[in-house]
Amino acid sequence: MAALKDIKRRITGIEDLKKITGTMYMVSSVRFKLVQKKVKYIDNLIEKLRDIMSKIPVKPRSRASLPLFIVIGSDRGLAGGYNSNLMDMVYKEISEHEGTKIISLGRKVEKFFAKKGIATVKSFKDIDSQLPPEVINDLIREAIKSYKDDSEIYVAYTHFAGVTRLEPKIARVLPPLPTEGYPSGDYIFEPSPEEILELLMEFYLKMSIESFYLNSHISEQAARMVAMESATENADELLEDLGALYHQRRKDIITREISEIVSGAEGISL
């Protein structure tokens, strides 16, 4: 009887867990759909903006200056390898530059660097599907300040290429990467390239950061949907196995009790 109670308790626990994973899947699915159109729109816009910025010739940064990395992760886990894949890539990259300046977005990012003993310049947590204006402005100020101190600015994020195609990436935003084969030396800029960059810099950074964040957010929801779907399927398999075991044990107990009754009846008749 005790064994049956244990199996029943396990079945109840897994059923409760299945309800949680199913609910989390639905929540992530709704959030995913809400941001999907925004990602498509801003990706098209930022592609055109990057094309413009890439044609502005700027002086390369000094190799002696430490780069600034803005790392975009999540506040919550239960999203498969969403955070760990990105963190591993970033850690490998910054290991080559001791003292790299880091700004973290998301509790998981902050905890990762704290465990590695790496200090962050700034940390932002508890951010929903859209970056608040004050956070964007703060990031832009830090990026421009570092760029004027001769640093390169990078953003580490997860690019959404499909529900099952989430690509951790590190993108250089300042100075803009030049277009390959573009003959910038053949053009005269008025005002100067530096002045044009100065005029466009804030808008370019704002749109770039929003694009990276939206890609990261939709990737997080996609990763959590896949993880919760897998967890629900595993729960179904466990329930099926435990159900079969429960009924087999119950059958064995009933068979044994019948055998005992029959044996007792035979003993009385003798």
Image (spheres, helix red, strand yellow):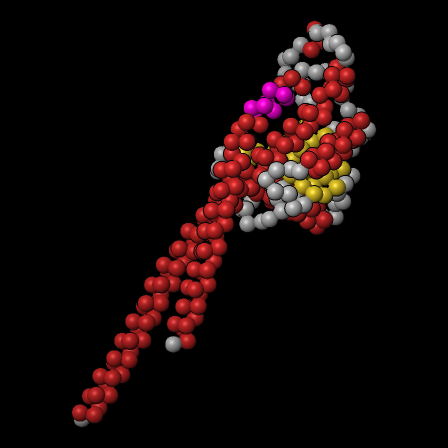
Residue drawn 18% across the image and 93% down it: 270
On the image, the x and y values in percent for residue 65 come to 80, 30
Tell whether position 229 is magenta: no
On the image, the x and y values in percent for residue 92 come to 67, 39
On the image, the x and y values in percent for residue 238 come to 41, 58
Residue drawn 49% across the image and 37% down it: 33
Residue drawn 73% across the image and 39% down it: 102
The residue segment tinted magenta is 43-50
Q: Residue 141 versus residue 194: which sits nearer the camera?
A: 141
Q: Quadrant of residue 212?
A: top right
Q: Is residue 170 visible?
A: no
Residue drawn 35% across the image and 67% down it: 246
User: So how many labels did they put on this image?
Assistant: 0
In the displayed image of the protein, which residue is found farthest to the left?
269
| 149 to the left or right of 197 | right
On the image, the x and y values in percent for residue 84 come to 60, 44
Tell whether position 48 is magenta: yes
Which secondary structure class fits the magenta region best? helix
Instruction: Please say if 80 is above or below 256.
Output: above
Q: Residue 36 versus residue 116: which sits nearer the camera?
A: 36
Q: Quadrant of residue 82?
A: top right
Q: Looking at the rendering, in which quadrant would you find the N terminus?
A: bottom left
Instruction: Please say if 192 is above or below 253.
Output: above
Instruction: Please say if 212 is above or below 119.
Output: above
Q: Is residue 236 visible?
A: yes
| 161 to the left or right of 198 | left
